[in-house]
Image: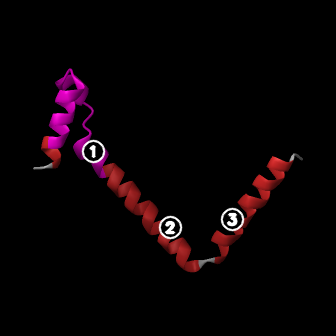
Amino acid sequence: MSKFAYLFKKFSLLYIEGFKTMQLGKTLWKIIIIKLIVMFGILKIFIFDKNIDNMFSTNEQKSAFVLENLTK
């Protein structure tokens, strides 16, 4: 096994064991992941419409549209 693979394995095992033993950290990571999913899901659905490419031809028009909708 190469030195890089050995160090990568030891490094990953360190983090895996650390996540297994900490109770508060697991809860916080779950909250962070749920918040990210909700934030990006809502942004994807309501702000970054799939039809924006069909509505505008230039990037300036697209950015103005997004800015206008964000500041409503």
Q: Which mark is residue 16?
A: 3
For the stretch drawn in magenta, what is the main secondary structure? helix
Q: Quadrant of residue 35?
A: bottom left
- Where is mark 2, residue-wise? 29
Alpha-carbon span between mark 1 and mark 2: 24 Å
Image: 37 above or below 48: below
Please say whether residue 64 is one of the residues in the magenta stretch.
yes
Between marks 1 and 3, how big is the CA–CA gap? 34 Å
- Return the residue nearer the eye: 6 or 29: 6
Q: Which mark sits nearer the N-terminus, 3 or 2?
A: 3
- Amino acid type at image mark 3: Ile
The residue positioned 68% from the left and 65% from the top of the image is: 15
Label 3 residue SS: helix
Residue at the spot x=55%, y=72% of the render? 26
Q: Which residues are magenta?
A: 42-67
Nearer to us: label 1 or label 2: 2
Q: Name the outermost residue toward the top.
A: 57
